[in-house]
Every structure is written in structure tokens, then in C-alpha cells.
Amino acid sequence: MQVSRRQFLKVTAGGLAASSMGVLGFLPSEALAEVRQFRLARAKEIRNTCPYCSVGCGLLMYSLGDGAKNAKAEIIHIEGDPDHPVSRGSLCPKGAGLLDFIHSPNRLKHPEVREAGSNSWKRISWHEAIERIARHIKDDRDANFVTKTADGVTVNRWLSTAMLTASASSNETGILTQKVMRSLGIVGTDAQARVCHGPTVSALASTFGRGAMTNSWVDISNADFILIMGGNPAEAHPVGFKWAVEAKKRGARIVVVDPRYNRSAAVADEYLPIRAGSDIVFLGGVINWLVANDKIQWEYVRAYTNAAFIVKEGFGFEDGLFSGYDAAKGQYDRSSWNYEFEADGTTAKTDPTLQHPRCVWNLMRAHYARYTPELVEDLTGTPKDGFLRVCQHLGSTAVRDRVGTILYALGWTQHTVGAQNIRTMAMIQLLLGNIGMPGGGVNALRGHSNIQGLSDLGLLSTSLPGYLTLPSEKAHPTFADYIAKTAPKAQAPGQLNFWANTPKFFVSLLKWFWGDKATAENNWGYDWLPKWDKMYDVLQVMDLMHNGKVNGFIVQGFNPLTSFPDARKTAADFAKLKYMVVIDPIATETASFWQNHGEVNEVDTASIKTEVFRLPSSCFAEEDGAIVNSSRWLQWHWKGANPPGEAKTDQEILAELFMAVRALYAKEGGTAPEPILNLSWPYKNPLEPTPEELAKELNGRALADIPDPKDPTKFLARKGEQIPNFALLRDDGTTMSACWIFAGCWTQAGNQMARRDNTDAGLGNTPGWAWAWPANRRIIYNRASCDPSGKPWDPKRTLISWNGTAWAGADVPDFKADSPPADGMNPFIMNPEGVGRLFCTDKLVDGPFPEHYEPMESPLGTNPLHPKVVSSPAVRIFKADRERLGTHDQFPYVGTTYRLTEHFQFWTKSVRLNAIAQPEQFVEIGETLAAEKGIQAGDWVQVSSKRGHIKAKAVVTKRIKALKVAGRTVHQIGIPLHWGWETVAKKGFLSNTLPPAVGDCNTQTPEYKAFLVNVEKIGVA
């Protein structure tokens, strides 16, 4: 039968057209020639953003439905948005399958409960679900809430219920979650960032002042050299990777360093293998080579880094330990990791000649002198000649007119030394003068569509929005203590120290939380915020759960059973809960942890007494809102249809739940009701705050007229108006803002996140498309793209420059716009010194310089650099988890996890198109190891660690080479992570059964990229 595209879509709207097979071209031949005709025939076009990785590709969704009151719209087609300046109409295999995500048979449609000991779900009404959960929350909170410590400090925290928050939900959902969660006193909370890019924030903020990707996706095309290490963007960020390919077309060289020859390596100029967990050896060797060969951008280093700063007497490093180590506590006293100061106590001493033996330059040079090319080859397995070529490529950018960039992701973050992996590369880029430059930077490729935004919104245990710190009972018992300790003084003369504005940001935040109830007399409601005594990250919470100290778990858009390490222990811990609440658009293994699925999840269902509520939420296509891509762009998207069945938006679910809890406190009283009853809730419909209302709160508004200090007859903003930027925020209670770095996203002029002007202002900058924090800057630290006199280092890469009266150009200056070069203000305005840190004072718990430590499970069993200190001495590991560590004699091979192009985490196994593309679990094994084990392609193998095992098909490959390391052969096994039992593909094992529950020293992001396993053949295909 011959049909046109319009006829085809019309007659199959409920069948094949509701599948992404159409996107792949499985349509009649005539249809392929009539791409747009159906768009005009009854279909409505809606702009949206892909919910998967952090590229933030633009989408065009088409829905049927004429908009009549009783008509139900249905999304029938999705394609790429050709206007989007990053994706330009492209979609990857995951984006191509989005229609099947929306219409997945695993979408949840009705509230359900699994009663204690039951083996099935029971459908219940929303009213019953909300009332029962609210009762659980109030009873548990009343029984376990801590109001004060023994010494009288008000802490108002609730530890017996924890909460996880989403990775793809909108900023508007995220900020409402923050408001509800903190009013309840929850500190045991995390977003997906804790298990992915937490070390990025820690490393980059402690080096440059902010913890975000420095440049943008399009800007990658401006690079002369691209090093891909600790990531695989062609696989994990396919559409964003096009800009690396564009750079290559313009003459850039690309080198990939990875344990596996991956898809990024396939298009690179050179690939080098490396042992998982040895990155600091490689990068430390680069630092040593750059210093030894004088490949340093000296003018940049002297002016814009702390190379000349003098470190305190008493600092040292010996036999694997920095000064100040307390073996009994397993922690460092970091007081010696700081500068010497002048008599005023704030101005750091410097030696511009770099001759002082304790200046940062000399300490750094001595520290990395041990990292010779021979050591690099011996400990990493990377061939020496290849390593030296990387050094030469990087060294070639230590000049004004050449720039290099680094693309990395979880291959660096998911280690016990994750933050220090990133720190090492950040140091290299400072030495080369590549920070602030177009085509330069340290580009952290975030893995989820809005995990950048949810990090910005402070959905982590010790954070608040805008990277403010949640008060600590020890450091901040009072409001005055908080202000004194979070608003540092400038450490260089004439330096802009932006964090000195913390009081303005913090008071404006408290006014958002508690509105009129936050007054100067009660310190703006300061004591209603919970205070922490230690970091309640996911590993800490799971240890508390393991020990029976957590009763409730609220899980919003997260699948921790598949995402947390040591999955079998995690499942056993879930069975100790009294109640669990799962808010998600799709069925997850977390919600069904109590179901027996044979060997992939062998549990005794009847003995598990956890009451589990499963609440259906909307997905990306069914809500308005904004998400933040890896480039810090806030992009607004629009709703295309209602969610299926009785599903509701996250905002509605959270609001109904909060209002039910508040009603119980209003009626019954209870423990510490004030933070709940006093919470500002000014929404037109209290049961459903709108995305627009929440977005305006994120921006902030004036609560009183704000006079212009230069002219008292004029006003910068009138009472009730949206503020134009964070410069208007005040510490006197006259402004409110839920997230100061988002101020400017929805001004009195309207929604800046919805802007769609893709005009290139120069070097790929599109300042009229969406809105980027902070202040719409696209490349942060861009003052460093100019020399101290204000002239661009490279005139061909002029981003901004001093025009005689102001800084201006293709980007918004990340600087005081009217500060002339003669004032000597330095470019890293978020650091009190104004410079980038080669030596990281006292900000990280495991050292001011990165040092190589072996993974907690090392294939060597020793550390040739310092045999007495094998792994990081600052690692925090709980007793129950330490007992589950394996050794190289039992488990001789290195396992490392990774993502596939066709799948995204644990979502797409419920998506028909992606399940077809990759339907079955497999692991990659090198040819040499396979021959030793008698394993052939397609054989079934069992991969085991001390924590458990998985079974999968073997892919025997040349992509993973055996490496010679420290005189022995090291084999590595590649383990994709996408499997489970809630799937439309074949059921599979949870790959996170294998890695240990131990994390990065600074952020506790789990060590998924280097752990010990064994592999055995168990059957033939």
C-alpha cells in the first residue's frame, strides 16, 4: 500500500507512529520525502530539551490535539531542533528514542503501595497515598527530630528519614524540593551529583573559585589540541562531541588516554592505553615534563597563579604523607597547608622572583620531580613514547597563540582520588595559560541533563543554593559565626573578593525560605535551617541504614539500587526501612527491590517489611521548566501533553505532601513545628506551585524599593519587581532570591531562559540563546584571556578586552567591568587571592598537591612511590564496607564501568528503540585474557568481586590490551552499567553489585572505575 507521510501518521497515531522507529526511517518511501507535511496537518509544535546527557540538545515535539478543554494531546513525533546552537538538529540514539520513553510500557500511571511482606502492588488513590505518607513523615520526625545538641546549639535536624533528588527534573522542581526538605530538617540528602560529578565541584572550585565546566560545547571547536582523558564524549555525549570533530577539521589534534579503545579513540589522532586508577601518575608526569622543558606560559603563571605565594613553615610531604596527618583519626590537620601572611593577617606574602624555597613554584617543582617518564610508563602501562608525545602536544600550547582543552567525565571523578585527578589537570592548564581562553579550559562533561542545575540548587547534604554552605553545628552555631566564616577577606591588595557578598546572598535566601517570618530580630530565621555535624552523603546514609538508624527513604527521580555501590548490601539495607516513597515516571529496581527475580535479585519477599509507595510523576515532555546543561545554560522547555493516567508533576506531588504534613502540625502540634508552619508558601494554588512562580523566585525580587546609591531620587528596583541581577541583592531583608547565581534568569523584562536568538557574537558565543549563570557569561574567568595590560593573549581569539573605559567583547566579562588593568585586579575573582591555585591551601582533605595513591582495591598490592602508604590516607570507609574489600590474590583483574551510546543509565532499558539496539548484558574482555581463560566471543561468563557477581555475555575484543605495570601483567575488564530487571529488553544483573562502597576523599563519590574482579567462563552461547 502506498501512503504519504501525513496519511501514514494519521492512520497509525496510536500504533507505529507512537514509536521512534519512525525516527530511524522505518516509514514508507514517500514519507521520507515529505518530512514536514504532517507538521501542518493538525499537529502542534512544542520546543523542549533532551532529558538525557548534559549537552542539552534542542527538541521539536509534535502533538495531536486541538487544545479543546476535553481533548487530550498526544505526542506523536520528536526530532532535533535545527535552531539550537549546540545540537543544530542532531539527536543521538537516545534522543532518537525519546518518543518510546514517553510511551514506554513501564510508565507509571497510578499511585500504588506495596504493603509490608506483600508480593504485589496495590493500587490506591492519591488522597490515601498522600495521607499515609504524611503520617509516616510526621510520626518519624516527631520521634527522632534533634532540636539542640548537648551543649545547647540549635540544630533542628531530622536524620531518621533521608531523601534523594532527581537528575533530570527541572530547576523549578529542584528548588521546591530544597524548600520542603530543609523545612522538615532533612540533611541526609543527595542528588545524582554525589555519585557522578561531585569531585568536579570540589576540585574546580578549590582551584579557580567555581566548580563548573569552564567553557562551552561550541567553544571546544576553538581548541588547537584536545586531550580526552577520564571520559568518552563520543559515546556519552555524541552530539556535543561534534564540536571536537569541528576542531579537528580546523587542524586540532585529538589524543585519547583511556583503559579501553573507545568510540572517542576511533576518531582521534592517537590513542594511549592506561591502567585505571593511575591518572595522577600520568598527569603528574606531564607537570614534571613541562617544568623540566620550560614549557610554561610564564607571563600568565606569574600574574594569574599563586606560583609566587609563600607557604607556611611546617608544611611538608614525606613518604606519602603531607604534614599534619593524624593516624588515629585518619585525617589531616590542614593548618600548615596555607600561606604566610603579612602583619595584617590577611595579605598573603609573595616572592615574584620565585626564589623563595617555600614559594608554591618550588614546592610544586620538587613534588613532581619524582614523576619521571620512566615512572609513568612503569605505573600506568602507557608507552613512554606516547606519553612524551602528549607532553609535547600540551607543551605546544604554552604560548599566546595556541590553546588546548581537556574533556573529562566520570573516568576521573569516580575514584577515591577523584577530586585530585581533576586538580592535576587544572594545574596543567594554569601552567599553560589555558584557563579563561576560548578553546581552553577544564571541561567537565556532566552526565545528566540537569545535574548541573540541581548541584547549583544545593541538593546535596551540606549545601544550599548558589554553592552556599548549609550551616554546621561546629563552625556556625550562630548567624554571626556563619557570616564571619563564609565571607572571606581578600588576600591581595585591591582584589575583588566576590564571596565577601555572602551575607547578601544568604539573607536573600533566608527571606525566600521564610518570607515575612524571617526578620532581623530572629536572624532571618537562621535557626530554622538544619545544621549538620558531618556530611550525610549517600554512603554515610547507607551505613546508618545498615545499622538500623534510618526509617524512611524518599526517592525522587533516582534509582539508588542501580546507582549505589555494593548493590546486594544496598538491597539488604532497604529491607530494614519502615517506609520508602518512590516518585518517578517509570518503574525502577529501587521501588521493586523486594521482588524476587531469581538470581538477578534473589530475596525473601515475605520477610521484607518495608512499606513502599510508588507515585507516578510526569516526564520531561509533560511539564514546563528549565534545565541547566553542562555549559551552565538555563534552557526553558515547554509542555507538550499531560502525563499518562493519574500521574502528576513533581511540584504537585511535593506540594500536596508538604501541605498534608503542615496540616497535621497545625492540627496536632508536634516537635519543632516552626520551620514548617513559618515556611513561605505564596503560590496562587498552594497544592500546585507553577514553574513560572518558582522560576521567578529563583531569580529573586525586591521586597522594598531599592534606591540607587548614586542618585537617591532614582530606584534600581521597585517593591515587587524582579531584580535584574545579583548585584541588587541586599543583606537587610529588602530582597529575596532562591539561588543568587540564577539572578537574571527571569527579570522584569521576562523569561531570559526562553530566548532563542542564536546569533554568533564571535568565537561561537551565542549570548542571546537561553541564559547562562553567572550573569549570562559563557566562558568563565575570561579576564584571563587577556594579559595584565588588558590586551588579548591571542588577537585571533579576542573574547573580551579593555576598550579604555570598560571590559567588553563577544562575552560578558567575568570581572568588574569598569576596573582598568592599571588597578592590578586579578581575574579569579571567586578566590580571595584573585589567582588560580597551583597549591590548594586548606580546601581539600587529602592534600594541597595531587599525589598518586592506589585504588582501595589495587592490582599491585603496593604503591611503588611510597609502599607504606598505598591508598589515600584520608579515605573514609565504614567498618562493614572495609570488611567487603577484596585483594589482588583473590581477584586478580581490574574492573571498570562505562556507559554505552545506545543507553542512558537505567532509563533506556525501558525504551523500546534502545532496548532493540542493545538488548543484552555483556562485558568486554581482552583477547589475551580470553585466551588464558578459554573464553570465546558470545560465551557466558561470571564476573565476581568480594561483594557478589554478575553473569553476562563475553565480548572478546582488541579494545582492551594487557598492560605491563610494575613488572607484572595487568588485565582490565570493561563492564557496561545499564542492566536490571525493570526492562523491556532481557533482564540483567546490576553491575554495581561489583564495586566497593568507598568514595572520593572530598565528596564520597564512589570508586566505580577501578576495583578488583575475577572472571570465569560458565557456559557457551
Image (cartoon, helix red, strand yellow):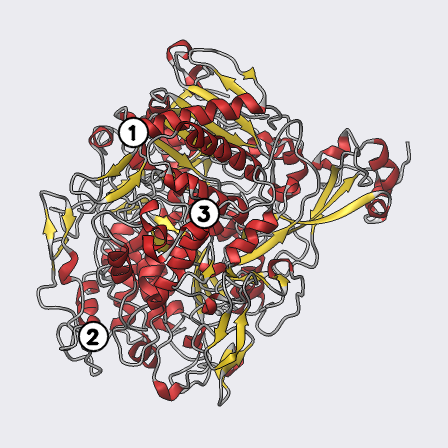
Query: Residue 507 location in percent, x, y?
Result: 38, 58
Q: Amino acid at mark 2?
A: Ala
**Which disc number belongs to residue 144?**
1
Q: Nearer the viewer, residue 655 or 284?
A: 655
Q: Which residue lies at the image location 51% right of the left edge and 28% below the top edge?
A: 588
Q: Amino acid at mark 3?
A: Tyr
Viewport quadrant of the N terminus: top right
What distance separates the C-alpha of mark 2 from that of mark 3?
46 Å
Where residue 502 sits, quadrant-wise, is: bottom left
**Which disc number belongs to residue 348?**
2
On the question of residue 16 being in view, the answer is yes
Q: Nearer the viewer, residue 573 or 6?
A: 573
On the question of residue 22 being in view, the answer is no
What distance separates the C-alpha of mark 1 from that of mark 2?
46 Å
Q: Earlier in the sequence, mark 1 or mark 3?
A: 1
Q: Which residue lies at the image location 32% right of the left edge and 72% below the top edge?
A: 835
Q: Earlier in the sequence, mark 1 or mark 2?
A: 1
Query: Residue 190 location in percent, x, y?
Result: 39, 41
Query: Residue 176 location in percent, x, y?
Result: 49, 44
Q: Is residue 325 above or below residue 947?
A: below
Q: Which residue is mark 3?
A: 261
- Horizontally, residue 376 falls left or right of residue 591, namely left
Q: Earlier in the sequence, mark 2 or mark 3?
A: 3
Identify the element where label 2 is drawn.
loop
